[in-house]
Image (cartoon, rainbow, N blue to C red):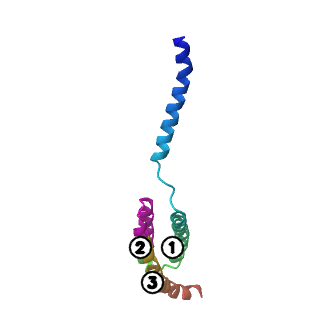
Amino acid sequence: LGLALVATLLPAFEAARITIVAAKRESGRGQRSPFWQRAFLDLLLLLVDASTDHFASEHELMRSIAYPAYDVHVSEHNLFLAHVSRLLENHAQGRAALTLESARALRPWLAEHIRNQDGALVAYAQPAAG
C-alpha cells in the first residue's frame, strides 16, 4: 500500500516541481520592451546596414580616383559607425534616454559630413568623371 501510494504521488510531485520551476523562470525574465524601443532598434540596425554598404561604395570610389583625403574621409565614417555602435550598446543596456539623446546628435553630424566631406569628394570626382 505504501509503495503504491509513493508510486502514485511521485509523478504528481515531479510535475508540480517542474511547474514551479517554470513559473519562477518566467517571472525572472524581463518584460518585453515597448514597441517604440523595438522599432528604434530596427531603425538603428537598418542605419548600420545601409551606412556600411554606402561607405563601402564611397571607399571604392575614393580609391579608384586616388582621392587625396581618403584617410580623413574613412576616419569620419569609422567615427559615425562607432557612434551608432554606442547607441546600440546603450539601447541593449536599457538606457533609452541616453540612446535618444545620442541619436539626436547624428542628424547635425550627418548634415555636416555630407556638406563638407562628401561635397569635397564630389568636387574632386567630377573632373575625374568628365
Q: Residue 20 versus residue 77: which sits nearer the camera? A: 20
Q: Quadrant of the C terminus?
A: bottom right
Binning the other alpha carbons within 10 Å of mark 2 as few (below 14), some (14 to 19) or many (20 upward) gives few
The answer to whether residue 76 is magenta is yes
Stretch in magenta: 75-99
Q: Amino acid type of disc 2?
A: Glu
Tag 2's secondary structure?
helix
Q: Specify the quadrant of the image occupied by residue 4.
A: top right
Badge 3 or badge 2: first in the primary sequence: 2
Q: Amino acid type of disc 1?
A: His
Closer mark to the observer between disc 2 and disc 1: 2
Q: Specify the quadrant of the image occupied by residue 61.
A: bottom right
Tag 1's secondary structure?
helix
Compute the Cα span from label 3 to label 2. 18 Å
Compute the Cα span from label 2 to label 1. 29 Å
Q: Residue furthest right?
A: 130
Label 1 sits on residue: 59
Q: Quadrant of the N terminus?
A: top right
Tag 3's secondary structure?
helix
Q: Residue 33 versus residue 12: which sits nearer the camera? A: 12
Label 3 sits on residue: 112
Question: Picture coordinates of residue 120 (x, y %)?
Answer: 47, 86
Q: Which mark is residue 101?
A: 2
Q: Amino acid type of disc 3?
A: Glu
Question: Picture coordinates of residue 100 (x, y %)?
Answer: 44, 71
Asked whether the residues under the numbered discs 3 and 2 touch, taking CB atoms below 8 Å apart as contact, a structural biologist would say no
Badge 3 or badge 1: first in the primary sequence: 1
Badge 2 or badge 1: first in the primary sequence: 1
The answer to whether residue 65 is magenta is no
Question: Picture coordinates of residue 69 (x, y %)?
Answer: 43, 80
